[in-house]
Image (cartoon, rainbow, N blue to C red):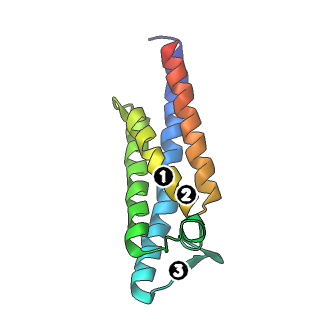
Amino acid sequence: MSRRDPLLRAIDAAAGTLALLAGLGFGIPAVVGAVHMARYHGIWTLWGFPSYGRGAFEQVLGIRSSVPLIIGFAVVCLALCVTGVLVVIGRRQARRALAVVLVPALVYCLGFTLPSGIVAVALIGLLLVVASLILRR
């Protein structure tokens, strides 16, 4: 065992746990929001905020929120959960898989204007970069 193994394990645990929490924290409301939109044809509000509507997708790009768009985000959140767990348990290539999932996660967080999601994705990415630098030493 090398000296960096405990540090690398701690970084993996932090990155994977944050990915899991972000995936659950945004994915569960995404499913609820998609069901609400399918039923009532409107954007669901969570704690007074429009969830998955009226963000940059709509205001900047002209892409209205839809059930498929929100379900796409829920699938990305599921991928965050799965890859996060794989990173925590130390599966081979899990860090790379998580890095790949961060790209659509960032696009959705920017598109739905989810500031805490953007911060979470940035922190996970930073932790993955640090892990990569530790491995190259």
Say which residue appears at 42% left-offset and 50% top-offset: 81
Closer-to-camera residue (109/23)? 109
Q: Is residue 42 above or below residue 97?
A: below
- Give the Cα distance between marks 1 and 3: 20 Å
Number of numbered tags placed on the structure image: 3
Residue at the image point whose x is 43% and y is 56% from the top: 77
Label placed on residue 43: 3
Q: Position of residue 86 (x, y in %)?
A: 37, 39
Where residue 14 sits, quadrant-wise, is top right
Secondary element type, mark 2: helix
Is label 2 in contact with label 1 (beta carbons under 8 Å)?
yes
Q: Quadrant of the N terminus?
A: top left
Q: Is residue 78 left or right of residue 123?
A: left
Q: Residue at x 48, y 74 (%)?
A: 65
Q: Where does the image place residue 22, in percent across and percent down from the top left?
A: 52, 53
Mark 1 vs 3, N-terminal side: 3
Report the Cα–Cα distance between label 2 and label 3: 16 Å
The amino acid sitting under disc 1 is: Ala
